[in-house]
Image (cartoon, grey):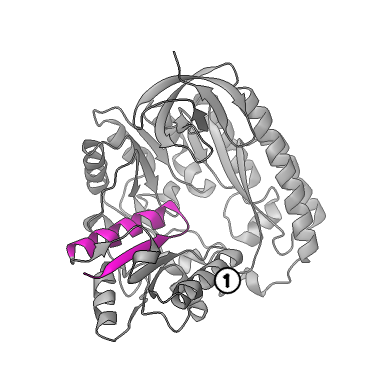
Amino acid sequence: MTRVHVETYGCTRNRADAEIMEAILVRAGYSLVETPETADYVVVNTCAVKDPTEKHMRERIAELIGSGKRVIVTGCLPHVSPEAIDPRVSGILGVKSIDRIAEAISVAERGGKLVSVEGWRERSIDKLELPRLWKNGVAFVVPISEGCLNGCTYCATRFARGVLKSYKPELVVKWVKEALARGYREIQLSSEDTGCYGFDIGTNLARLLDEITAIESDFRIRVGMMNPNHAIKILDELVDAYRDPKVYRFLHLPVQSGDNDVLRRMGRMYTVEEFEEIVRRFRRKVRGLNLNTDIIVGFPGETEEAFQNTVELVKRVRPDKINVSRYSPRPGTVAARWKQLPGWKVKERSRLLHRLRLQIAHEINRSYVGRTVEVLVHGAGEKGGVEGRTFNYKEIILDSGEPGEFVPAKVVKATSTYLLGSASP
C-alpha cells in the first residue's frame, strides 16, 4: 500500500485543508504515516505569506526530493510563486484543487504529473462539503469562508484564496455539532477574514456566533482574525455576541500601521481612529479582552514620523500581543513595485517595536498573577507541564489536568508570552 505523509505550514486554514486531503487519501485506499521518513509520497501543504516563508518552502521541497521522496505540492505557493517550485515534484495542486489529491498521487504512480492550479474564477469548491479526517484532540478548526473582500497592496494570499466565498451557516453549525459530539471542546472559526463572513450571502459573523453559542454543550469558540473595516460595520452585534461565555474573549484585530497615510498606501480601507474605536467598544463591554494585533514595519513610504505614530498607537492601545512583521515584497503585488526602505532601517524599527511589545505583554500578564481563572486543558505542553487556554485564550502552563476538561487554576507566574498556574486543589 502506498504510504503518504501530509506536511502542513502556515495558518489554521491550511490545517483544515490538510485534514480534508488526509480524509480523501484514506477513502482512496492510501495509508497515512506520521513521519516523512516512512512515506512514499510527501504532500507539502505550503504557505507563501512572506518571503522568508517562501524560501523555507523551497528548501524543504528540495530537501525531501533529495532524500528520495516523491513530493506533491499544495497550498498557496503554486498561486503566489509557481516558479519557486522544484520542477522535480510529482504533482502541483492549488488551494481550489485539494479535492484532487488522491488523483494527483494516482497519476504520479503511473508516471504522470497532475498540475491543477485553477484560480477562484475557474474553480470553486465548498470545502465544508468535503470529508475531514477526525483526530484525537481538544481543538477543531471549522472554516467559515474562503477569500476576502480587501485589496491590500502588499498581500499575495488573495491570489490564492480569491474573493469572499462564505459557507452556509447551517453547514458550519453542522460541523460544530459533529466536532462536539466527537469530544472536541474548542471550535476555531477560521477564514482569511472572519469579519466579512456572510456579507456575500446576507448574514454576518455575529449572527453565526449566535447560532453556534445556542448549541447545548460546554465548549469554547475562538474567532479568527478579522479586519477593522469589516468589524466596524457590525460592531454592536459583534460585541454582544462576544459577551456569551462560550466565546473566548479574544480579539485578533490587525492594525498593520499606526499612521493613516501608510494605511492608505497599504489599501487597508480604515483609519487608526476606527481601529481604536473598535478596541474601546470591545473593552467597554467585554471584560478581560485579550487583544492581539499585527503590525508591518518598513512598508514602502513609511517615514520616521509614520513609524513613531505606530509606536505611539501601541503605547496608547497596549495590545496583549503584537505580531510584528518586517515588510517583504511579494510577487505580483502593487507595493513590490514601489521604492523599498533600506534593510537596516526595517530591522532597526522591528527590534524597537519587538522590545516594546514584550514589555507591554509582560506588564499585562503580570496583572494576572494571584488570580484564579478558568482554563480549558489542551494537553502536554511544549514547555513542559500541561498546556491550556484561559477564558480569554491566553496560553497557560499548568502542573496538572486532563485534555478537554475545564479547571480553575491560580496564576502563579507570568512571562511576556504565557502564564504559569496551578490546578492543584
Rendered image quadrant of residue 18: bottom left
Q: 40 or 47, which lies in front? A: 40
189 in relation to 286, above or below:
below
Q: Residue at x 54, y 33 (%)?
A: 290
Is residue 11 highlighted in magenta?
yes
Image quadrant for the N terminus?
A: bottom left
Q: Residue at x 78, y 66 (%)?
A: 342
Is residue 171 highlighted in magenta?
no
Q: 96 or 264, which lies in front? A: 96
Label 1: element kind: loop
Estimate the x, y position of residue 115 in percent, counting from the top left.
35, 80
Q: Residue at x 60, y 67 (%)?
A: 51
* Residue 142 relative to residue 278: left or right: left
- The span picked out in magenta is 1-27
Q: 79 or 181, which lies in front? A: 181
Q: In this rendering, does residue 154 appear at all?
A: no
Q: Residue at x 80, y 60 (%)?
A: 345
150 in relation to 249, above or below:
below
* Residue 286 relative to residue 271: left or right: left
Residue density around tag 1, few if under 14, some if 14–19, many if 20 or more, within 10 Å: some
Q: In this rendering, does residue 414 appear at all?
A: yes
Residue type at numbered disc 1: Thr
Estimate the x, y position of residue 399 in percent, counting from the top left.
48, 25
Rendered image quadrant of residue 181: top left
Which residue is at the far top?
425
Q: Write down the residue under mark 1.
A: 333
Image quadrant for the C terminus?
A: top left
Estimate the x, y position of residue 209 in percent, counting from the top left.
34, 37
Estimate the x, y position of residue 158 in percent, counting from the top left.
47, 65
Label total for image:
1
367 in relation to 305, above or below:
above
* Residue 379 relative to residue 84: left or right: left
